[in-house]
Amino acid sequence: MTKRAPLILIEGLDRTGKTTQTTLLQSSIPSSHLLKFPDRTTEIGKLINEYLTNKQLKMSDQSAHLLFSANRWELAEHIKSLLYKGEVIIMDRYVYSGVAYSAAKEVPGMSLEWCLSCDKGLPKPDLTIFLKLREGGNGQREGFGEERYEVSEFQSRVRQQFEKFENVENKWCSLEVDGLSIEQVQALIWEKVSLLKDQEGKWLTTEE
Ligand code: DGP
Ligand code: NA
Ligand code: NA
């Protein structure tokens, strides 16, 4: 089995600081890559963007879920090739968002297991950091409400779905970020990321 560099994922509800923190993290790790999901630039991504920004657009919940998953699969080979070259990948959302947002819709038949099943086989994160704000905390942040899922009641259900991973997934780390500055959150994240390095500061490799 070949070894690969770590895949570091930052997850959270909308407007919790993921983009800021993933950008900062990427700039502190030489020759690392930042990938953001959904990737709205691909053909599938453009459809997703339309779905998220145009609340009038009708699409079945199953189809929307499969589009988000397909968007991750579009990049699977690219992700693997970077990791096997030894380059660290940082991600802004990935499979857990996929499951949490779709399962939160509570549509019959769209169980957590159903939502997870189409992402089976994607490269797995070696560390998932979940940025956690107190209930409703993100609703007060700038820009909240612009897109389809940015409704407080729905966010609270998404949060419950994310919390299901807290005690079952090893490699999961929830960080309470209420009241913390950008620099303080950055330091907490760095502390966790450092655990992926050996004593000489080399990245621990994983096999998959
Ligand atoms: P962002 O660009 O990070 O703000 O994400 C866009 C929105 O899409 C956000 O509300 C979370 C949601 N989202 C991300 N991934 C998935 C997914 O796989 N499935 C569903 N249903 N929603 C997702
Ligand atoms: Na958003
Ligand atoms: Na974001």
Image: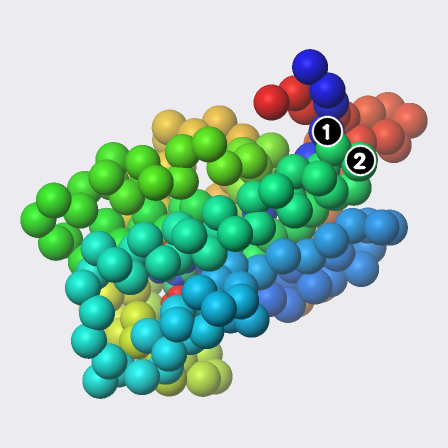
Of residues 3 and 139, the one drawn nearer to the viewer in this rendering: 3
Residue found at the very far left of the displayed protein: 108
Identified by mark 2, the residue type is Gly
Q: Is residue 47 left or right of residue 40?
A: left
Q: Determine the image quadrant of residue 128.
A: top right
**Residue identifier under label 1:** 4
The residue at 31%/84% (across/down) is: 54
Q: Quadrant of the C terminus?
A: top right
The residue at 82%/55% (across/down) is: 28
Of residues 174 and 112, the one drawn nearer to the viewer in this rendering: 112
Question: In the picture shown, does residue 70 fall above or below 13?
Answer: above
Image position, residue 171 (x, y; %): 54, 31
Quadrant containing ligand 1 reads bottom left
**Residue identifier under label 2:** 86
Question: In the picture shown, does residue 44 fall above or below 102?
Answer: below
Image position, residue 151 (x, y; %): 27, 74
> Can the viewer see residue 15 in this picture?
no
